[in-house]
Image (cartoon, rainbow, N blue to C red):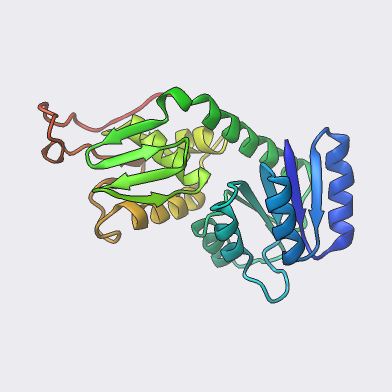
Amino acid sequence: MKLLVVDSDRDLVEMLTSWLKTLGYEVYRAYTAERARSEWLEQRPDIVIMDTALKDVDMLTMCRELRNKHDALIVVVTDEKDVRDEVRCLESGADDYLRKPFFPSQLLARIRAVGRRSRSTLERRPSSVVTVGPICIDSLHNEVTIHGKTMRLTPTESKLLHLLAISANDVCTANQIVTHVWGYDGEGDAGLIKAHIRHLRQKVEPDPGNPHYILTVPGVGYTLVRRPAEEADMKDAPRPLRVVSM
Protein backbone atom coordinates (compact mmCIF):
# COMPACT_ATOMS: atom_id res chain seq x y z
CA MET A 1 0.00 0.00 0.00
CA LYS A 2 1.25 3.48 -0.92
CA LEU A 3 1.10 6.27 1.63
CA LEU A 4 1.79 9.99 1.21
CA VAL A 5 2.63 11.96 4.37
CA VAL A 6 2.11 15.73 4.05
CA ASP A 7 3.09 18.12 6.86
CA SER A 8 5.21 21.26 7.26
CA ASP A 9 6.74 19.68 10.38
CA ARG A 10 9.77 17.97 8.82
CA ASP A 11 10.69 16.09 11.99
CA LEU A 12 7.22 14.57 12.23
CA VAL A 13 7.23 13.63 8.54
CA GLU A 14 10.65 11.97 8.80
CA MET A 15 9.66 10.08 11.93
CA LEU A 16 6.39 8.83 10.45
CA THR A 17 8.04 7.94 7.15
CA SER A 18 10.75 5.85 8.79
CA TRP A 19 8.34 4.13 11.16
CA LEU A 20 5.75 3.32 8.47
CA LYS A 21 8.43 1.90 6.19
CA THR A 22 9.47 -0.54 8.93
CA LEU A 23 5.86 -1.79 8.87
CA GLY A 24 6.10 -2.56 5.16
CA TYR A 25 4.35 0.46 3.67
CA GLU A 26 5.62 2.31 0.59
CA VAL A 27 5.86 5.86 1.91
CA TYR A 28 6.34 9.21 0.16
CA ARG A 29 6.67 12.60 1.85
CA ALA A 30 5.92 16.26 1.21
CA TYR A 31 6.50 19.39 3.28
CA THR A 32 4.70 21.84 0.97
CA ALA A 33 1.46 21.90 -0.99
CA GLU A 34 3.38 22.10 -4.28
CA ARG A 35 5.36 18.97 -3.42
CA ALA A 36 2.22 17.23 -2.18
CA ARG A 37 0.50 17.90 -5.51
CA SER A 38 3.49 16.51 -7.43
CA GLU A 39 3.79 13.37 -5.30
CA TRP A 40 0.03 12.75 -5.38
CA LEU A 41 -0.11 12.79 -9.19
CA GLU A 42 3.19 10.98 -9.74
CA GLN A 43 3.03 8.26 -7.06
CA ARG A 44 -0.79 7.82 -6.97
CA PRO A 45 -1.01 6.94 -3.25
CA ASP A 46 -3.76 4.85 -1.71
CA ILE A 47 -3.91 6.99 1.45
CA VAL A 48 -2.84 10.59 2.07
CA ILE A 49 -2.00 11.49 5.68
CA MET A 50 -1.94 15.25 5.87
CA ASP A 51 -2.12 18.37 7.98
CA THR A 52 -4.47 20.93 6.44
CA ALA A 53 -2.48 23.89 7.84
CA LEU A 54 0.05 24.35 5.05
CA LYS A 55 1.02 27.93 4.31
CA ASP A 56 -1.14 29.96 1.90
CA VAL A 57 -3.03 26.91 0.57
CA ASP A 58 -6.49 25.49 1.21
CA MET A 59 -5.45 21.84 1.33
CA LEU A 60 -9.01 20.51 1.31
CA THR A 61 -9.79 22.39 -1.90
CA MET A 62 -6.59 21.06 -3.44
CA CYS A 63 -7.50 17.51 -2.39
CA ARG A 64 -10.91 17.74 -4.06
CA GLU A 65 -9.19 18.87 -7.25
CA LEU A 66 -6.58 16.11 -7.13
CA ARG A 67 -9.16 13.43 -6.40
CA ASN A 68 -10.64 14.08 -9.84
CA LYS A 69 -7.30 12.94 -11.30
CA HIS A 70 -6.42 10.20 -8.81
CA ASP A 71 -8.74 9.23 -5.99
CA ALA A 72 -7.19 8.57 -2.59
CA LEU A 73 -8.42 8.16 0.96
CA ILE A 74 -7.54 11.09 3.24
CA VAL A 75 -6.63 11.00 6.93
CA VAL A 76 -6.30 14.50 8.41
CA VAL A 77 -3.85 14.98 11.31
CA THR A 78 -3.93 18.41 12.90
CA ASP A 79 -3.16 20.57 15.93
CA GLU A 80 -6.61 22.16 15.64
CA LYS A 81 -8.68 21.69 18.81
CA ASP A 82 -11.96 23.22 17.66
CA VAL A 83 -14.53 20.51 16.89
CA ARG A 84 -15.84 22.72 14.08
CA ASP A 85 -12.61 22.06 12.19
CA GLU A 86 -13.25 18.32 12.40
CA VAL A 87 -16.75 18.79 11.02
CA ARG A 88 -15.43 21.04 8.23
CA CYS A 89 -12.78 18.50 7.21
CA LEU A 90 -15.18 15.56 7.22
CA GLU A 91 -17.82 17.48 5.31
CA SER A 92 -15.18 18.52 2.77
CA GLY A 93 -14.29 14.92 2.01
CA ALA A 94 -11.75 13.74 4.59
CA ASP A 95 -12.22 10.07 5.46
CA ASP A 96 -10.86 10.25 8.99
CA TYR A 97 -9.53 12.83 11.44
CA LEU A 98 -6.86 12.59 14.13
CA ARG A 99 -5.75 15.31 16.54
CA LYS A 100 -2.11 15.86 17.48
CA PRO A 101 -0.42 14.71 19.56
CA PHE A 102 -1.34 11.10 18.86
CA PHE A 103 0.11 7.69 19.58
CA PRO A 104 1.54 5.84 16.56
CA SER A 105 -0.91 3.02 17.26
CA GLN A 106 -3.81 5.45 16.76
CA LEU A 107 -2.57 6.44 13.32
CA LEU A 108 -1.85 2.82 12.41
CA ALA A 109 -5.41 1.82 13.36
CA ARG A 110 -6.81 4.45 11.01
CA ILE A 111 -4.49 3.45 8.16
CA ARG A 112 -5.53 -0.17 8.54
CA ALA A 113 -9.22 0.76 8.76
CA VAL A 114 -9.25 2.87 5.60
CA GLY A 115 -7.09 0.21 3.93
CA ARG A 116 -9.73 -2.42 4.67
CA ARG A 117 -12.32 -0.04 3.28
CA SER A 118 -10.36 0.34 0.05
CA ARG A 119 -10.00 -3.43 -0.38
CA SER A 120 -13.69 -3.90 0.38
CA THR A 121 -14.58 -1.46 -2.38
CA LEU A 122 -12.57 -3.47 -4.90
CA GLU A 123 -14.16 -6.73 -3.74
CA ARG A 124 -17.64 -5.30 -4.41
CA ARG A 125 -17.08 -4.81 -8.14
CA PRO A 126 -19.66 -7.39 -9.37
CA SER A 127 -22.45 -5.62 -7.39
CA SER A 128 -21.08 -2.10 -7.22
CA VAL A 129 -24.18 -0.47 -8.75
CA VAL A 130 -27.29 -0.32 -6.56
CA THR A 131 -30.50 1.51 -7.48
CA VAL A 132 -33.11 2.69 -4.98
CA GLY A 133 -35.92 4.65 -6.63
CA PRO A 134 -34.35 7.50 -8.61
CA ILE A 135 -31.02 7.10 -6.79
CA CYS A 136 -28.31 5.02 -8.49
CA ILE A 137 -25.09 4.46 -6.53
CA ASP A 138 -21.94 3.31 -8.35
CA SER A 139 -19.59 2.48 -5.48
CA LEU A 140 -16.82 1.34 -7.84
CA HIS A 141 -16.53 4.78 -9.41
CA ASN A 142 -17.69 6.68 -6.29
CA GLU A 143 -20.64 8.31 -8.04
CA VAL A 144 -24.33 8.81 -7.40
CA THR A 145 -26.90 9.62 -10.08
CA ILE A 146 -30.30 11.02 -9.16
CA HIS A 147 -32.89 12.11 -11.72
CA GLY A 148 -30.18 11.92 -14.40
CA LYS A 149 -27.67 14.15 -12.60
CA THR A 150 -24.38 12.48 -11.65
CA MET A 151 -22.25 13.69 -8.74
CA ARG A 152 -18.93 12.56 -7.31
CA LEU A 153 -18.75 10.98 -3.87
CA THR A 154 -15.78 10.60 -1.59
CA PRO A 155 -14.85 6.95 -0.89
CA THR A 156 -16.39 7.23 2.58
CA GLU A 157 -19.61 8.79 1.29
CA SER A 158 -19.79 6.09 -1.37
CA LYS A 159 -19.45 3.26 1.11
CA LEU A 160 -21.96 4.81 3.50
CA LEU A 161 -24.56 5.42 0.78
CA HIS A 162 -23.98 1.91 -0.61
CA LEU A 163 -24.66 0.44 2.84
CA LEU A 164 -27.88 2.44 3.18
CA ALA A 165 -28.93 1.43 -0.35
CA ILE A 166 -28.47 -2.32 0.10
CA SER A 167 -30.39 -1.96 3.38
CA ALA A 168 -33.11 0.26 1.88
CA ASN A 169 -36.10 0.71 4.22
CA ASP A 170 -34.14 -0.94 7.04
CA VAL A 171 -32.53 1.07 9.82
CA CYS A 172 -28.74 0.95 10.07
CA THR A 173 -27.54 1.67 13.59
CA ALA A 174 -24.56 3.91 14.36
CA ASN A 175 -22.48 0.90 15.44
CA GLN A 176 -23.28 -0.98 12.24
CA ILE A 177 -22.38 2.04 10.11
CA VAL A 178 -19.04 2.59 11.86
CA THR A 179 -18.12 -1.10 11.64
CA HIS A 180 -19.03 -1.30 7.93
CA VAL A 181 -17.67 2.04 6.77
CA TRP A 182 -14.68 2.69 9.04
CA GLY A 183 -13.83 -0.83 10.15
CA TYR A 184 -13.85 0.00 13.86
CA ASP A 185 -15.45 -2.12 16.56
CA GLY A 186 -17.34 -0.73 19.52
CA GLU A 187 -19.61 2.25 19.90
CA GLY A 188 -20.44 4.37 16.85
CA ASP A 189 -19.15 7.92 16.57
CA ALA A 190 -22.40 9.87 16.20
CA GLY A 191 -20.69 13.13 15.20
CA LEU A 192 -18.61 11.48 12.49
CA ILE A 193 -21.64 9.75 10.99
CA LYS A 194 -23.79 12.88 11.21
CA ALA A 195 -21.24 14.93 9.27
CA HIS A 196 -21.17 12.44 6.38
CA ILE A 197 -24.96 12.05 6.38
CA ARG A 198 -25.30 15.84 6.14
CA HIS A 199 -22.91 15.92 3.19
CA LEU A 200 -24.75 13.07 1.42
CA ARG A 201 -28.05 14.88 1.85
CA GLN A 202 -26.57 17.94 0.16
CA LYS A 203 -25.87 15.75 -2.86
CA VAL A 204 -29.03 13.63 -3.14
CA GLU A 205 -31.85 15.54 -1.44
CA PRO A 206 -33.97 18.16 -3.25
CA ASP A 207 -34.17 19.99 0.10
CA PRO A 208 -31.33 18.85 2.42
CA GLY A 209 -32.97 20.56 5.40
CA ASN A 210 -36.15 18.51 4.87
CA PRO A 211 -34.84 15.10 3.75
CA HIS A 212 -36.99 12.91 1.53
CA TYR A 213 -34.71 9.89 1.08
CA ILE A 214 -32.05 9.69 3.83
CA LEU A 215 -33.98 9.78 7.08
CA THR A 216 -32.90 9.86 10.71
CA VAL A 217 -34.52 7.36 13.06
CA PRO A 218 -34.05 9.10 16.44
CA GLY A 219 -32.10 7.08 18.94
CA VAL A 220 -31.44 4.28 16.44
CA GLY A 221 -29.69 5.31 13.22
CA TYR A 222 -30.40 6.12 9.58
CA THR A 223 -32.33 4.65 6.68
CA LEU A 224 -32.57 5.20 2.94
CA VAL A 225 -36.29 5.11 2.10
CA ARG A 226 -37.44 3.27 -1.00
CA ARG A 227 -40.42 5.13 -2.42
CA PRO A 228 -42.36 2.90 -4.86
CA ALA A 229 -44.29 5.81 -6.37
CA GLU A 230 -41.00 6.97 -7.87
CA GLU A 231 -40.10 3.56 -9.33
CA ALA A 232 -41.90 2.73 -12.55
CA ASP A 233 -41.29 -1.01 -12.28
CA MET A 234 -42.03 -1.50 -8.59
CA LYS A 235 -45.43 -2.84 -7.58
CA ASP A 236 -45.10 -3.75 -3.92
CA ALA A 237 -45.84 -1.33 -1.09
CA PRO A 238 -42.92 -0.24 1.07
CA ARG A 239 -42.00 -2.51 3.95
CA PRO A 240 -42.11 -1.20 7.53
CA LEU A 241 -38.77 0.04 8.80
CA ARG A 242 -36.80 -2.44 10.87
CA VAL A 243 -33.33 -2.55 12.39
CA VAL A 244 -30.94 -4.72 10.39
CA SER A 245 -28.54 -7.25 11.85
CA MET A 246 -25.01 -7.38 10.45
**Residue at 28% in and 42% down:** 135
Residue 10 occupies quadrant: bottom right
Q: Can residue 217 be seen here? A: no
In the rendered image, which quarter contains the N terminus? top right
Relative image position of residue 41 (x, y in whole percent): 68, 52
Residue 210 in the figure: left or right of residue 175: left
Which residue reaches farthest bottom?
A: 56
Residue 166 vs 202, above or below: the answer is: above
Relative image position of residue 153 (x, y in whole percent): 45, 48
Relative image position of residue 58 (x, y in whole percent): 62, 70
**Residue at 72% in and 69% down:** 54
Residue 228 occupies quadrant: top left
Residue 203 in the figure: left or right of residue 134: right
Residue 47 occupies quadrant: top right
**Depth check: 104 or 137 in front?**
137
Residue 34 in the figure: left or right of residue 23: left
- Figure disc tally: 0
**Residue at 65% in and 50% down:** 75
Residue 46 vs 245, above or below: the answer is: below
Q: Can residue 191 be seen here? A: yes
Residue 74 vs 109, above or below: the answer is: below
**Residue at 46% in and 33% down:** 176
**Depth check: 166 or 139 in front?**
139
Relative image position of residue 187 (x, y in whole percent): 53, 38
**Depth check: 14 or 29 in front?**
29
